Amino acid sequence: MKRFSILLLGMLLLGSVKGWAKVPDEEDILARITDPTSAFFYPNLMMRYNSGDRTLGEEEYHYLYYGFAYQEEYRPLESNDALDKLMLVASTLDIDNPEVRSLEQILVAGEEALRRDPFSPQVLNLMAYAYGGLGNTEREQTAYEQMRHVLRTIESSGDGLSKDTPCHILMFDHALSLLGSYELTTERARIISRDVEYVPLTTPRTLMGKKIKGYYFDYSRIYRNKPEGYVFKRDRTWQFNNLKPREYK
């Protein structure tokens, strides 16, 4: 199959009209993910996700992603040492001719990093790349589909064009991953309220005749359980759009 940039994920462009769009409703999410009779009961959804179930659709991913904010494992302000290890390995990769040992290291570190952040687009992208490089097309496609659905879920939570219609994220780097998937380069994010940050683009883009200088993201879930006295420091980010997982129709 043809390899190509994750820039083209088959998703709609940010700020355009969406076929599926759902702003997270916290009461609705909590009620559904905690109800054992619900199709969105969280333990069942996460079991299907972890097993690589590709029948999960956009609605299931909506409750999976935003429902994670209510799980004990969701600790966005804690360090993720496995992610640091993963990024270190990735930074030394020969993208076009990777060594088997490096790809295997990516998978080991990636699995560990996903325990802390199971919906990290950058980790899922690296996993898809590594599986593809090792010839495991089944696992490659699964990781690719998971990444695609996560990005689409974030994108569908708002158009990101104003502070009143932001895209909703669970981790700061998820916002950068979404913008990076369109090969949009960004400047330093600006906190504009207790709930919303603004990520300016290095170069404005034109969409449907309108010039867009940046996007807004709701980061409020990250600080809901912030430890007293905690001072946030941004982790370094990984520009992941130069990796080339396969395209799946």
Image: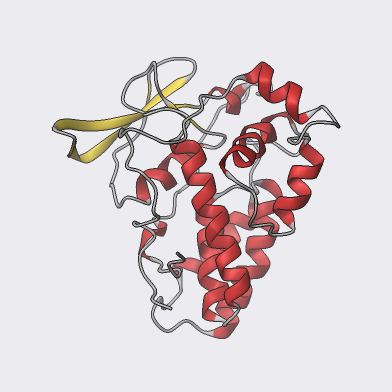
Residue closest to the eye, 194 or 35: 35
Question: Would you say residue 173 is visible in this rendering?
Answer: no
Give left or right: position of 159 versus 28: left
On the image, the x and y values in percent for residue 72 come to 78, 34
Farthest-out residue, right: 36
Is 51 drawn above or below residue 160 in the view shown?
below
Exactly how many numbered labels are in the figure?
0
Give the quarter of the image for residue 163. top left
- Quadrant where the N terminus sits is bottom left
- Quadrant where the C terminus sits is bottom left
Residue closest to the eye, 99 or 181: 181
Farthest-out residue, left: 209
On the image, the x and y values in percent for residue 204 come to 18, 37
Question: What's the coloring here?
Answer: secondary structure
Is 249 drawn above or below residue 137 in the view shown?
above
Give left or right: position of 175 versus 29: left
Question: Would you say residue 102 is visible in this rendering?
Answer: yes
Residue depicted at 39% across the width and 60% down the height? 6
On the image, the x and y values in percent for residue 15 come to 31, 33
Residue depicted at 52% across the width and 33% down the height? 169
Residue depicted at 49% across the width and 37% down the height? 154
Give left or right: position of 209 versus 239: left
Residue closest to the eye, 164 or 20: 20
On the image, the x and y values in percent for residue 230 come to 62, 25
Give left or right: position of 54 versus 15: right
Residue depicted at 68% across the width and 16% down the height? 27
Give the quarter of the image for residue 231. top right
